[in-house]
Amino acid sequence: MRNTLLFLFTSVLLTNTFAQTGTLTGKILIDDHFTVLPGASIFLEKTSFGSSTNGRGNYLVTNIPFGTYEMVIAYIGYETIRKEIVISEADTLVQDFYMTESVVALGEALIMTQGHTGLKEIPGSVHYISPKEIEKFNYTDINRTLRSVPGINIQEEDGYGLRPNIGLRGTGVERSSKITIMEDGVLMAPAPYADPAAYYFPTIGRMQGVEI
């Protein structure tokens, strides 16, 4: 008789425990109401309950205890959605959401190895033309820009800086044949020695700095 009463009591306790949880489900789309967002994150703030959308934009969170929660929907490139929800029945709460694309303007990032002071530690002759200097004169001709740098020899050819003859002190001025010209650390192509009469040279007007 004692064993039977214990069995009945345990059954009632388990039934009440499972009856205290609910399920949260729905679909996540963008604000055109047609395109789904697979991989969107859905979670309840300050809890361990969460999920993500599948390939059809559907999500499912189960075994949520009764209570009031702050639901968060997040996806990279879209505005985060926060909404207060109430789980009050042992049933399924359906919540669909429509996310709006978020445009974020990133600030300018300037990365330098040792700053401007590091130039003084390099052996030899080094010169740096800063963005402020380029903007001040607003030259589109590399010849005019480099004339302020000591130790550079320039021979004009077309007057527009499209095919400059640049030489550093002691190298000569034969079509930049003994110097290396790089844009963003990459060798220019085709190289000056490949076809000296038609090689490409970048427009100085779109440069942010010049290192010599």
Image (cartoon, rainbow, N blue to C red):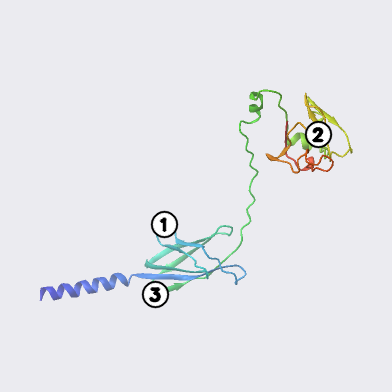
Counting from the top left corner in percent of width and height, residue 160 is at 87, 39
144 or 15, nearer to the observer:
144
Label 2 amino acid? Thr
Circle on res. 91 = 3
User: Which residue is rendered at x = 45% and y = 63% of the image?
Assistant: 51
Tell me the SS state at disc 2: helix
Q: Quadrant of residue 124?
A: top right
Residue 86 vs residue 1: left or right? right
Circle on res. 113 = none
Tell me the SS state at disc 1: loop
User: Which residue is rendered at x = 33% and y = 70% of the image?
Assistant: 20
Residue 161 vs residue 14: left or right? right
Instruction: Please identify the residue farthest to the right as the structure is shown.
Output: 158
Disc 2 to disc 1, C-alpha distance: 59 Å
* Residue that mark 2 sits on: 145
Which quarter of the image is occupied by the N terminus? Answer: bottom left
